[in-house]
Image (tube, rainbow, N blue to C red):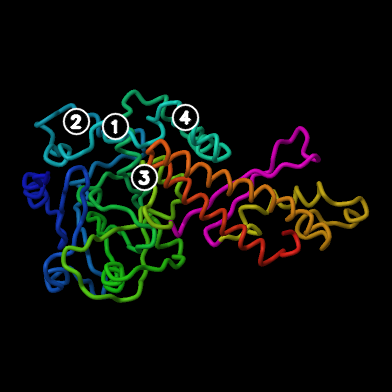
Amino acid sequence: MKTDFAPFLSWCDAQGISTPLRLVGEGSYRSMRLPPTKEELMGQSTSPDGLVKVVQVPLDACIIGEDLPTLVEKLKYEVDKGDDSKYAPWLSLFPTLEGFQDMPRFWDPKRLDLVRKFDGGQLEGRMDIDKQRINQCNDPWALACVDSRSNFLPDETYSITPMLDMFNHDASYKTSARVDGGNRFMLELTQESIFGSTGNGNTMTTGDWTDQIFGFFKGASSPGEYQPGAEVFVSYGAFDSVETLTNYGFVSEKPNVCNIEQFKVRSLGMSGSGPAILIVDNEGTIDNLFNTMSLDALRKILATSEELEGYNGSGKISQRNEVEVFALIAGELEEAAYDSKMGVAEAESQNDALVAKYFRERQRTLEMGLKWLRNKFPEVF
C-alpha cells in the first residue's frame, strides 16, 4: 500500500523545504529516489563547487534542542498538541511504537538471550551504556524517535530535520551537511557519489573529521549511468552494526564498510582482572589503536622475567612473545567466529532475519581478522 505524502509535501513547500528527489513509500518502507531526468536533479540544486543539494531545510522548520533530553521533551510537546502543532503533517508520518520493535531495547528476554549466547555479550554491553538514560525517560516512543532521527548541528545542538529523516542509511555513501548562512540546513552529495552509487557499487574511503560534524560524509565513488527512480542513501555516520542495531533497529543488507567487532581473550595470568577485550577493525586488523592497551597487557602476562627486563611498557617485547600473544588471540578469535556462525544458524532456524544479519556481519568481520592473522603470523595456525 502506497503512503499518501501529499499533506507532508505541501507542508514542506510552505516551510521552504526543498529537494529535487522523490519521496516514495511502499508499506512501512520509505525512500528518496532520483527524479525522471538528470536535468531535474541538477537544475538549481548544484552549488558552484559541483555538489548537488539534495535537501535544503530552514532551521525554523526543524525541532531543535540543546541536548537529546530537551529534544525528547520538545517532540512530546508538539505531539501532545495534535493537529494544532506546526509540525502535524510531518509528525503524522513518524513510526508508531510498534514500528520501533526492532530496536533491542524493546526485545523480549528470549531474543536477547539468543544474541548473548553467541556474541560474547557484545550487544548487551552496548545496551548497558544506554540503560540509565533509557530508564529515566518516561516516553520510550519519543526517545526512540530522537535516537533514530536526530542529527548534530555545528552549534552543538541537536535537530530532528524534516525530509532528512526520510533517507535510508548506507555507510558506503558519502554526503556532506552544513548550515548555510546560519539558518538553513543543507545536505549535499557529489555528482560522482550520486551517479556512482546507483551504478554497480560504491567504495568507502576515510573522510576527514571536519566532514563529519553532522555524522554525514562527503566523497566520491566511481561514476555510473543515471538511473531514474534509483534510491539515494546517506551515511548516518561511520557506525558499526552494533550501533545501527541499537539506535536504529537495523543491520545493513550488504557488508558494512565501517563495521568493527569485539571478542574476548582469556589467559590464566588474568586471574582477577577479567578477559581482555580486543577489536577487529573495519579493515580486519587486530594490531590497531583500539587494542593498544589490551595487547600490551597480554604481552606482559605472557612475557618471561628476562624479557621484561628493560621493557619500556609498550609495544613488542620479543618475537617469541609476539607469536605467543597472537597464538592465544587466534584461538579465541576462531572460537568467536565459530560462535557467530552458529548464531546465524540458530537465528535462521527461528526465522529471525534481523538477528541472523547481525551474526552474519559479525562472522564476516571476525573472519577478516583471522585472515589478517594468517597473513601476519602463519606459524600460529
Give the quarter of the figure containing the C terminus. bottom right
Q: Which residue is mark 4?
A: 131
Give the quarter of the figure containing the N terminus. top left
Q: Is residue 46 above or below residue 309?
A: below
Q: Are marks 1 and 2 in contact (CB under 8 Å)?
A: yes
Label whose residue precedes the other's in the sequence (1 or 3): 1
Looking at this view, name the residue that lies furthest to the right.
Answer: 306
Kindly indicate the quadrant of the structure image that contains residue 257. bottom left
Task: Give the distance between the C-alpha atoms of the residues marked 2 and 4, in whole angstroms.
Answer: 25 Å
Q: Which residue is mark 3?
A: 250
Residue depicted at 29% across the width and 37% down the height: 145
Label whose residue precedes the other's in the sequence (2 or 4): 2
Task: Specify whether 376 is left or right of 147.
Answer: right
Confirm whether residue 71 shows in the render.
Answer: no
Q: Which residues are magenta?
A: 256-283
How many residues crowd mark 4 within 10 Å: few (<14), some (14–19), many (20+)? few
Q: Which residue is mark 1?
A: 142
Q: Which residue is mark 2?
A: 79
Kindly indicate the quadrant of the structure image that contains residue 199. bottom left
Say what secondary structure mark 4 lies in.
helix
Label whose residue precedes the other's in the sequence (2 or 3): 2
Task: Specify whether 151 is left or right of 5.
Answer: right
Task: Give the distance between the C-alpha atoms of the residues marked 2 and 3, in whole angstroms.
Answer: 25 Å
